[in-house]
Image: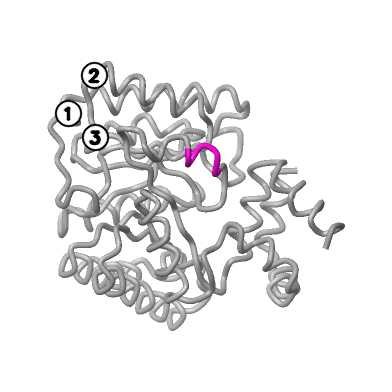
């Protein structure tokens, strides 16, 4: 089922149907803050008032022309400015394929430079999302370059990839902050763990490796409460969260070293459970008109999301 929904997420004709279907948007809006920047800022203000911090993602990936990549870059810059102007406690998350990575490496690099320069000017942290494995090397290459320009740049690491342990070592050497996730793309078994249990084991191993690194205890974010902790536990798996939090407590780590990161609209029970704990909870809040691929991946990740979609369809 997971592979099926990931396959559907790449379908242009299905995307056209879904994005013009009011019921689909009604359900997708459970996971997406809105289609406009103004709507997303209002949502961030609400979650901030409830005790959460946020990271905003202007949806869109795998742009098909350099002009579209340039447009996406300008939209991300507008987002950075809006975060600054509205004084909300939020980072920005970006996908490099959205700003031209699959089209032209150098054009993507120049677009990323514009984003980083504006983020540095506005004191906004930028998280580069990790996409499918075909883009991992290029993503890390651009990350290291961007981080040399501005320390407020971080990355996402996926525990289902065999290579992630080596990547984490390099990231630790460079002092780059991480969001650790399990992974949401369909990958060949030659490079990724097949069993969920193995993905979970590796998630805990990577958590252990990161938190026990000596530099983590001394990490202080640029702006506490706005910039993220060194490690973001990006998961809705309570066992993974408990492992990370318990280890952090044993190591004497606080809220500047570890935070919990969850997706907007998913596992609200867990979000409420941890929001008033000693560790921050950051919500990943996507918005924009290109919500279909993101929505399909949310259906792929959890059977409960599929059931929610289908059951609501028959009870409209």
Q: What's the residue at 71%, 58% (across, down)?
A: 8
Q: Earlier in the sequence, mark 2 or mark 3?
A: 2
Query: Disc 1 marks which residue?
Result: 217
Whether 177 is among the magenta residues is: no
Whether the residues at callouts 2 and 1 have beta carbons within 8 Å, the answer is yes
Instruction: Identify the image quadrant of residue 70.
Output: bottom left
Give the number of the disc on residue 64.
none
312 sits left or right of 299 in the view: right
User: How far apart in space, not on screen, are marks 3 and 1 (Cα)?
Assistant: 7 Å
Asked if disc 3 and disc 1 are in contact, CB closer than 8 Å, the reply is yes
Query: Residue 308: where, in percent of width, then height?
Result: 74, 49
Nearer to me, 163 or 252: 252
- Pick the residue in front: 1 or 26: 26
Q: Is residue 42 above or below residue 201?
A: below
Q: CA distance from mark 2 to mark 3?
A: 11 Å
Work out whether residue 77 or residue 160 is closer to the camera in this orientation and state it.
77
Sequence-first tag of 2 and 1: 1
Which comes sooner in the sequence, label 3 or label 1?
Answer: 1
What is the magenta range?
Answer: 268-272
Q: Secondary structure at mark 1?
A: helix
Q: Position of residue 165 (x, y in %)?
A: 37, 29
Identify which residue is drawn at 29% across, 24% down: 248
- Can you say which quadrant of the picture contains the C terminus? bottom right
Q: Is residue 31 left or right of residue 129?
A: right
Q: Mark 3 = which residue?
A: 257
Indicate the quadrant where residue 187 lies: top right
Residue under pointer 2:
251
Label 2 and label 1: CA atoms lie apart by 8 Å
Q: Position of residue 2 (x, y in %)?
A: 70, 43
């Amino acid at each position: 089922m997971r592979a099926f929904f990931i396959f559907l997420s790449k379908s242009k004709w299905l995307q056209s149907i879904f994005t013009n279907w009011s019921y689909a948007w009604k359900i997708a809006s459970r996971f997406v803050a809105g289609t406009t920047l103004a709507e997303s800022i209002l949502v961030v203000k609400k979650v901030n008032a409830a005790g959460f911090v946020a990271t905003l993602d202007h949806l869109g990936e795998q742009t098909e022309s350099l002009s579209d990549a340039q447009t996406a870059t300008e939209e991300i810059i507008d987002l950075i400015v809006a975060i600054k102007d509205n004084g909300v406690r939020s980072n920005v998350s970006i996908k490099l394929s959205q700003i031209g990575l699959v089209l032209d490496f150098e054009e993507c690099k120049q677009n990323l430079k514009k984003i980083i320069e504006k983020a540095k000017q506005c004191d906004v942290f930028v998280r580069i999302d990790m996409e499918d494995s075909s883009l991992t090397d290029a993503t890390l290459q651009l990350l290291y370059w961007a981080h040399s320009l501005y320390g407020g740049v971080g990355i996402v690491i996926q525990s289902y990839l065999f290579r992630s342990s080596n990547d984490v070592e390099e990231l630790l050497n460079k002092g780059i902050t991480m969001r650790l996730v399990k992974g949401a793309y369909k990958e060949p078994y030659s490079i990724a763990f097949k069993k969920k249990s193995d993905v979970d084991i590796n998630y805990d191993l990577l958590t252990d490796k990161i938190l026990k690194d000596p530099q983590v205890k001394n990490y202080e974010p640029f702006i506490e409460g706005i910039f993220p902790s060194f490690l973001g536990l990006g998961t809705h798996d309570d066992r993974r969260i408990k492992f990370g939090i318990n280890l952090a407590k044993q190591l004497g780590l606080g809220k500047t070293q570890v935070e919990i990161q969850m997706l907007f609209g998913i596992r609200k029970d867990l979000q409420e459970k941890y929001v008033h704990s000693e560790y921050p909870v950051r919500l990943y809040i996507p918005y924009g008109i290109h919500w279909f691929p993101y929505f399909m991946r949310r259906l792929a990740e959890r059977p409960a999301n599929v059931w929610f979609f289908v059951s609501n369809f028959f009870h409209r």
